[in-house]
Image (spheres, rainbow, N blue to C red):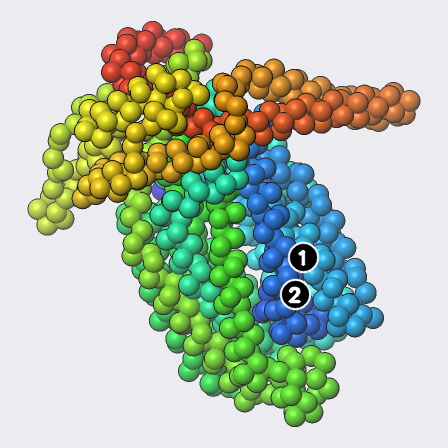
Amino acid sequence: MKDKIIKLLGDVKLYWKVPPKGRYMSFKEIASLSFGGIGVRLIVYTISQMMISVGNVLIGNTIGIDPSSLYVIYIISVLSAFPLTALRARMIDNTRSMKGKYRPYLISMGIPTVLLGAGFMWMPYERMSVVMKCASVLAFNIGFQFFFRFYNDAYDSLINVLSPNSIERSDVLSIKSVVENLSPSIVSIFLPLVAKAITGDDTLYDLKIYRVLFPPMLLVGFLISVIVYVNTEEKIVRAKTHVIGMKFSDAFRAVARNKYFWIISLAGWLGFLEGSFGSILGWMYNYQHAATAAQYSLITAISGNASFWPNLVAPFFIRKYGKKKILVFTNLLNIGFILLMLPIVRMTGSKSIIWLLLGCTFVNQFITSLGHLLNPSVNADIRDYQQYVSGERIDGMFAAVGLIGEIITLATGFVLPTLYSRSGLNAAVALSLGYDGSNVYDVLYDQSYFVRISSVLIVASVIGAVLNVLPMFFYDLTETKQKAMVKVLKIRALFEDRANNVLNDEKLCETVEIINSAREHAGKDLLPTDKKKLSKQQRKQNIIENEEIEIAKIVNEELTKYETEYGKFKLENSRAVVAAGLDGSVSAFSLTRAQAKAMPRTTQAEKERRNDALLSVSDHKAAVRARKKYFPDGIKEFDSSVFDGLFASEDALEREIHDALMAVKGAREHNDRGEARELKKQVEALRVKRSLVQREIKKATDGYSVYYRAAKPYLDAKRTLSQAENYERLDDLMSLYCEAKERIEAKNAR
């Protein structure tokens, strides 16, 4: 144990700024992502309390909006998110910034999120009618739908582009989950005690509590989160010269064909009732007085601690069993532990009841957290698959296509309010029990209704958990397949960069080694992995070798794809399309939808070829429509070199603004107000210039987007011919390897 600790400390020192071989993130980057995440999670915890949902305690129990009214404003809030999410998706997918794809939004979306959150808390809800309460909460939530969701998505999606290594992403997610969840855990522990100090009562449903705590928490959270922005670097596997520019509809269609996206999304949409039981533990404290404030703080601490332990074991389980098996197994166990709550809540009134419920909740949260911990890693794998099949990194569009889920949620959202109302959580029951009916949650003070309503929610949660697990049986994107896809992406990117004379020694050597390994393992049979017949060491070696054999199969299929019957047809079709020129390319395209649908689909490779053919036919039809609309008099090649100057100008202005801001800071430190004012004027002038350049970039990007759709069959044909030629000349690439390797070794020695 001592030796392992010494080795770990040595590795931290050695790889603090530079990642180990085969990895992409240094220890400094991992630490910054994790500790900065404490601030992000503090903001997420706080704003989540203000987001409209039927079971929201702050809006429902504290501000006093009943479930039916909550559902109405929830619908309006979700509908407002549609255009905002589409805008967000386009902004992310067409971002070309020296700061990265997601990092800039941690600042630009974080500031308005904090301001909106503070404003939400200081509205005079006590003096408002129900209509005014609803209008106020809705207005803030429309702002949250854009700024907060953008901020949260940017942080959650950042791991997708910090490393293309699925195992490394899972390891980092485990570490950062342990660290970043300290903030909500600490808040949950001390909230009951602080609430009692502020109000003098054992209640969490007093606005004074949140007005005192939430605004400072938002500010502190934002300041801590800046660590992530400053100390991380995005790394997308893409050609250096790749130009970003896709229309919303094109990206939407591309994501809509991603089967893994639909499997994961369907699991979430079908399981919308699974979390229905989540309020019961808090209700038992607040309405049935089953514990003191000190006891409930301890209960909250224990309950919150359930999410900690899965972070420690997740990397081990992922390596041993894979993400799919874990997700299926944890969901099945979850069903059983939710059911255990049913007899427990029916014992309400017993002194130990809340502790029994805690035990059940702890195990349930442990299991659920283990599954939820994998979601970011699974979503990152899905985005890698999207880039593998479409050639474009369109992460933002996943959120836009996910709006279909919001529509489904709207359609199913009435279920929970209906369950609440029909089980007794309504004004009529509140009046019959002697309350004034202004807050329907008063019904929960009555023990019989508490048991009845809680039992209904538990049964609903079981149904949700069953529906949630069913789609996961169809998920077959393994860790090995993801590794192979990333290797293929590296090969494609290298050849694209080679064609544009921007080769990188490190990437060249890495790619050549990928190809050599694939050739070495080509045609090999999988080795036995029987536990009974092999030693532990031999079995481990065989498993590693089998992974290389499976990866080699996918890589070799990529390198030899133009030798297949479909590959030869695609080459012939591409030659005809290119020979016809850009303007005549759509007429020369010969593949039909009937031919594509008739292609075999027995093996995975055949399925991928068939999907590729169907996609080509669809792109051809879209190009024909685009040309009729935008280029009725003929289409000419887009001069993409315009981006070079614009991007260089933007980068230069970014550096000038940074330097000027540093100068302003220095002038203030020296109390030179006159110099500071002049420098601030320079900063504003530079920002105006940057805004003009960014406007030109957007104009050029929009123009390229239209051209890209209309010219896609021609561009794809040129890319196909170039790729086929490159794959035929692999040995030329090998000849560059030795010199590149020598330069790298000399650099490392220095």
* Residue beneath disc 1: 141
In the shown orientation, is residue 223 left or right of residue 451?
A: right
N-terminal of the two: label 1 or label 2? Answer: 2
In the shown orientation, is residue 307 left or right of residue 426?
A: left
Q: Are marks 1 and 2 in contact (CB under 8 Å)?
A: yes
Q: Which mark, residue 73?
A: 2
Amino acid under label 1?
Asn
Relative to 319, residue 616 above or below: above
Q: Pointer 1: residues within 10 angstroms few (<14), some, or many (20+)?
A: many
Relative to 190, residue 399 above or below: above
Where is residue 497 shown, x and y percent of the image?
42, 17
Relative to 165, residue 641 above or below: above
Specify whether residue 34 is in view: no
In the shown orientation, is residue 134 left or right of residue 533?
A: right
What distance separates the C-alpha of mark 1 from that of mark 2? Answer: 9 Å
Q: How many marks?
A: 2
Where is residue 713 shown, x and y percent of the image?
39, 28
Of residue 352 and residue 458, the one placed in the foreground of this image is 458
Amino acid under label 2?
Ile
Q: Of the residues tagged 1 and 2, which is closer to the observer? A: 2
Where is residue 123 shown, x and y percent of the image?
79, 61
